[in-house]
Image (cartoon, rainbow, N blue to C red):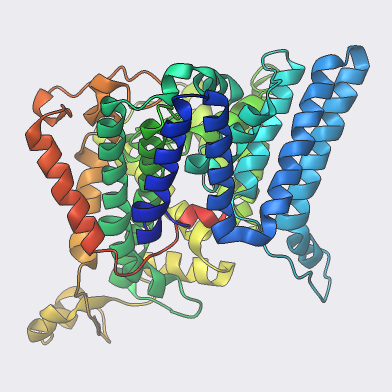
Amino acid sequence: MLFNSFSFLFLYLPLVLAGFFVLGRTSPRWAAVWLGMASLAFYGVGSARHVPLLLASIMFNFAAARAITHAAGTARRRVLLAAVAANLALLAYYKYANFFLGAVGAQSQLAIILPVGISFFTFTQIAFLVDCHRREASEVRFSHYFLFVSYFPHLVAGPVLHHKEMMPQFADARNYRPLAANFAIGMSIFVVGLAKKVLIADNLSPLAGPVFAAGAHPQMIEAWVGVLAYTFQLYFDFSGYSDMAIGLSRMFGVKLPLNFNAPHKALDIGAFWRRWHMTLSRFLRDYLYIALGGGRLGRLKRYRNLMLTMLLGGLWHGAGWTFVAWGALHGGFLVLHHCWQAWGGFRLAPLAAQALTFLAVMLAWVFFRAPDFGTAFDILGALAGANGVSLPRAFAPLAQWLPGAVGFDGLRWIELVGLGLPALALAAVLAFFAPTTQEIFCHYEPAFERILHRPARQWITWRPRPAWGLGFAGLFIVCVLSMNRVSEFLYFQF
C-alpha cells in the first residue's frame, strides 16, 4: 500500500486512526497492539509473501535482545555477534545472493524476490541489539517492540529508528488520546510531503527515464535535463515520503526523527551527508564508521574508514557495481574534503561551495541511476558534449544560423512539452531557496529533534489559522486530482 493512493487516504488511514484512539481511551496496550497489527496489514498489502519473514525477524530479535540483556561477560558479546550475523545473513541472502553469484561468474541465479523494507527493519533491529549490548536499551513488552519495528509510517522506506527515541513515546499514555493539534500539524505536514511526491517528483520522472534507458545515447541538453531531473526527482520523492511519514506519525501523537534538512543547501560534501538521509548517515556513523575506529587511529586510517563506510553504504542501496561506484565516489569526495581541511586549503565563497557540492552529488547520481557502466559513462560524456548537441524545437526557425555560430554540425531537435520543465524549475527553486518543512512548522516541534533555526520571515511559519487551513486544503485537493497515476517511492527499491 502506498501513502499516495486512494485506498490508503480514504480507507486504511481513517480506520486505523479510529481504532487506535477508541482503544486508547480504555487500554493503551490494546491500542498499541491494534496499531502493530494494522502496520502488519499495511506491509502485507504490498508484500504478503514476506509477512512471515517480518514476523520471524521481529520474534528472533526480541528473543536475542532478551538474551543479550540477561547474559554477562563474554557470553553477552557472543550472543550479540551471533544475532547480528543472523540479521546480516538474512539481508545478504535476499539482497546480495545473486550479486555475489554474478561476481564469481555463476551462470544461473536464484529466484529471489526482495522483501520491501528489509534493509530498514533489519538495520533498525541491529541498532537495537547493539544498544542492548551497550546497556543503553532494553524492552520487556513484546507488543511495544513489535510496534517499534513494524510501525507503518517508517517500515518500508525509513527512517532508521532508535529504540530510545520511540519507546518512551509508545509508553506515554497521553499519546493514546486524540489531540486536535496533532491532527492539524500532522495532516499539514503530510500534505506538504504528498505535494512533493505527486506534483514535483512524479512529473520529473518522464524527463529522467528516457535519458537513463540503456542505449539511449542522449545529447548534451537532453543529458543535462535528464540528470538534473533525476537529481531533483530522487530528492523530492524521498523528502516527500519522509514528510508524509512524519505527518502520519504525528497524527498518532508520535514524533519521528528527521531524515532531510535541505541537503542541496550544503556547502561541502560532509554537510551534505549530515543533511541527506540523516538517519542512515547516523547509523553508518555510529555502528560502522566508529566501530572501524573512526578518526581515532590516525589520518590514513580515518580515510580508510570513510572509504569503507561509503562503499558499504553504496552497496546497502543496491546489489550492483554501479552502487559500489557511487559509494566509492562519495567516499573519495569525503576523503578529499578532509584532506583539504587538514592542509588548510582556501575557502570557497558560499555560492561557489554550494554549486561545487551540488555538481559532485549530481554527477555521482549518474552511477546510482544508470543500469550499467556503459550507460553511465555515455551520459557523463553527453554532459560534456561528446554526443553532440540537441536543442528544443522552438529554436528550429534559427537553425540556419546556429551551426555556424556555435561550431557544431548535425543538430537534433527535442520535444520539451508537458509539466516536466516547469516542475524542474520549481524543484530547483524549492531545493535551493525555500524553507524546509521543519522550518515552516518550527513553532510546533514537527519531529523528534528540536528545530533551532527559524526563518527570519515569520509569515512563512505555520500557524493554526483559517488561511493556512484553506491553503493546505486546496493543496490537498490539487494533489488528489493529480493522482491519476499512482507510483511507488524510489526508495522502495533499496
Q: Eyeballing the image, is 72 above or below 128? A: above
Of residues 422 and 127, the one drawn nearer to the viewer in this rendering: 127
Residue 265 spot, x, y in % from top left: 31, 36
* Left or right side of 62 for 368: left
**Residue 73 % position (x, y):** 90, 12
Which residue occupies 24% across, 57% down? 479
Q: Is residue 304 visible?
A: no
* Residue 81 percent coordinates (x, y): 84, 30
On the question of residue 443 being in view, the answer is yes
Q: Nearer the viewer, residue 204 or 105?
A: 204
**Which corner quadrant of the image does residue 419 belong to?**
bottom left
Q: How many marks?
A: 0
348 relative to 491 in the view: left or right: left
Residue 215, given in percent of the width and then of the height, sits at 49, 80
Q: Observer-nearest residue: 264 or 18?
A: 18
What residue lies at 82% left-to-right and 34% top-to-bottom? 83
| Residue 373 in which image quadrant | bottom right
Whether residue 74 sits left or right of residue 217 in the image: it is: right
Q: Is residue 477 above or below residue 58?
A: below
Asked whether 461 or 265 is in front, the reply is 461
Whether residue 415 is situated above or below residue 161 in the rendered picture: below
Name which residue lies at 68% across and 56% down.
50
Quadrant of residue 216 within the rendered picture = bottom left
